[in-house]
Image: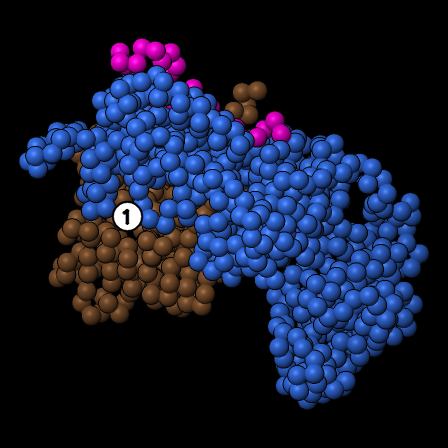
Chain colours: A blue, B brown
Amino acid sequence: MTRESLPLKIVFVGHVDHGKSTLIGRILHDTDSLPEGKIDMVKKACAAEGMEFEFAFVLDALLEEQKQNVTIDTTEIRFKTKRRKYIIIDAPGHKEFLKNMITGASRADAAVLVIAANEGVREQSRRHAYLLSLLGIKQLIVVVNKMDLAEFSQKRFEEIEKEYRKFLGELGLEARVFVPASAKNGDHVASASKKMKWHRGPTVLEALDLLESQKQDVDLPLRFCIQDVYRFDDRRIITGRIEAGKLRVGDELVFSPANKTSKVQSIEQWSGSSENEAVAGDSIGIMLSEQIFVERGYVASHQTDTPIEANRVHADVFWIVREPMRAGHLYDLRLATQEVKCEIVSIDDVMDSSTLEASKDKREQLERNEVGRLTLQTRSPLVIDNHDRIPKLGRFVIVDDGQICGGGTIFGGVYTDRTVAKSKNIFWVEGKITAEARAARTGHRGAVVWFTGLSGAGKSTIAQALERELFARGMQTYVLDGDNIRHGLNSNLGFSPEDRVENIRRVSEVAKLMADSGVVAITAFISPYRMDRRRAREIALEGNAEFVEVFVDAPLEVCEARDPKNLYKKARAGEIREFTGIDAPYEPPEDAEIIVHTNRQTVNESVATILEGLLPRLEPEQVDD
Amino acid sequence: MQRNQRTHLDHLENQSIFIFREAYHAFKNIAMPWSMGKDSNVLIWLARKAFFGRVPFPVLHIDTTYEFPEMLEFREWAKKHHSLNLIVKINTEARERGIGYETHDPVTVTHELKTVALQQVLAEYKWDALITGIRRDEDPTRAKERYFSPRNAQFEWDYKDQPPEFWGQFATSSAKGEHVRVQPLLDWTEVDVWRYIQREEIPIPQMYFARNGKRFRSLGCSPITQPIQSNASTIDEIITELEATKVGERAGRAQDHYERNAMQKLRAKGFL
């Protein structure tokens, strides 16, 4: 089978009436990419109307047909030169320009910007270039079209080139080449023109053929962005896409933001030959040699070149929805697979995208179609790179209510040497005394027994009864609950959603340590969110500890009737907010190891059910000699 | 190193797998319509690649009761072969009302036995996302599609106001009663699909290959799907044939051509 090269995706932009459609029509004609008879049909139609034939009509006719659903091969217009295939993304001239241009141009490898020689650089010539720079499109060809209306004048061409190059320079853009052309007559489109012998550069098609396919960023430092962790069978597969660099089996990876390390044990595949290496652009799944806790949003890199961790970033943000972006409003920021809450700290500048002049007024919000230089604060750490260094980790979208409202690129983040920072961190190491040795002495394995259920379901009561039972059997055990955690270890935490997450995270870590020391750690917290419990499980797994989830189940009415601490009454009266079961959700476990129903079972019956499920899991593993 | 040269197909495959995994993360309750056609089987294959051998959500066949027997045979074979959790849905109510190609026009029948059937099964299972095999090159009305394309509770698709989609970020929210169409094959062409089937040796129904000078290029209900004149009996021959043709893929599908803009009407009503 032939290895087909990638089609190059190009977007055509420029001021209205500067000849984008004509140029596309001419290119399609000169590369023989039009359906048979199309030109004749348009010529006849023009003759019938007494109009001069124009290539723009060819494109119009093509688009019209698409609209009317007459059969044609494709709507992404394709053409081919000797060198390669091209896809023209989206045709010019539709409404909702910014939104559609961003969607289309963000997929493009390169842009062709058209300027009419007679009119010169206009507002949209500048605005479009600005958008290209924001989208990070570096390859740009400028076609100075309609040279026939400027007497094919070298002087006029050079004037425009000089003026526009200066403007592009301010944007950090550089045009590959400026091509003088007349799309109408075909001068310098597919073949050199006798009328512009002074031009020694390439024709439009030659200039296109000189472009490069979008680089997949293989030569940049590794950035492997985690999408998900799958456990469909006994494998724990960490999946994601390599956004930059490459990854090999045996590589030591650093996972940000937690700074945890592990080695790549294998690259997993369902079909096809096994690979030792994956590169930027690949969607992969890997297994790690040491089980560490990672989840969606983590970014793996090599230790020699780690990304930036920050919770405050400077960014250029463009806004595309009617409702303005306001200070004081909480948005979701999505960067690769990360999603964090963010808000505006300050709007430092709002730019006129045509003149590139900053507006003088102090602004409280960013309007639709505006671009602002903002400082954003995120609620949790964000793993980033500067956009000019690793584009895919330096750009994000702002989401409100599930809708993408804008996007931005990051600049000015400061890299710190994580190899230095790392030595100060304490990493998880398995002590010299093995878990097996501890189990041999105590006669049982350590474990995390994680109780979850509504307030009043009976978690603490049953946990303490279970503790007594285990203790009576000579086992090492301890209950972690609100009483001994909230007042000490977690005394600095309140009841905000973030603090609740942190509360559970700390409990998970402490329980893991206790389990590793050989103790059966019983936790008794409402822990209403599946996500938090899943994380607790992952953390325990990371410490090679057994994790047993116990769902202490009782209907809300029953719990509310019991109300041992009068909390439901207070919640109903509005004195306590976000109380689980009243005005905050409880997500029941889907796959708890053990379930007890305290509306039907007594405390002793519940403990018996738990022991039945738990004790077999605590038996020391048989060690083969 | 030659090994690391990624081909056009590799890029398409990687992007599709990425989309599958994003969808699996974003939506709790997913189903994948499966027509047993070539694109559908590529989807199954990509799902198995994305999820390491399994398709971790139900696969849905809207059975119009006008299926080619060969396709049903393939369905039962492939169900076992891929270990699919298959849901078969028939709009029995419409059939009992006497809706059928014998008595009604193809647009009405397709609407009742496909779109309405889909609405019924969606109401029953309350899926929040459907993974479909729609490709941009298939039909002009599909050009403005997105990878993640929201449908409202009436199944309508507002092609004039599509959400922006860039930098690998998608519209992942669906309000109550709404669902999102996830379209991992959007960037693929008909030829890409064939090349991939060839490269990966993906099982497909034999009806795509020429027998007695005819083959099916696109497969739908038996009374309204016509084979094309062709001697292409291998994938290579099919690709050669496709590269020469200027005729549309769905030319043999009667419901598209019954009246002007038929496809648009079907699509706006929620046809896949």
* Extreme residue in the front direction: A360
The range drawn in magenta is A192-220
Residue at 42% x, 53% y is B163
Front residue of B59 and A112:
A112
Where is residue A250, by image quadrant? Answer: top right
Residue A96 location, x and y as percent?
Answer: 36, 50
Instruction: Report the side of B124 relative to A581 (left or right).
Output: left
In the rendered image, residue A559, in percent from the top left (x then y), is placed at 68, 84
What amino acid is found at the position of numbered circle 1 in the picture? Thr
| Number of dots carrying numbers | 1
Q: Is residue A217 magenta?
A: yes
What residue would you read off at disc 1?
Answer: B141
Residue A342 versus residue A603 in the image, above or below: above
Q: Point out residue B157 in the picture as x, y percentages from the top left corner.
A: 33, 57
Q: Magenta stretch: dominant SS?
A: loop
Horizontal relation, residue B14 to residue B116: left or right:
right
Locate residue B17, reporting x and y percent. Answer: 50, 42
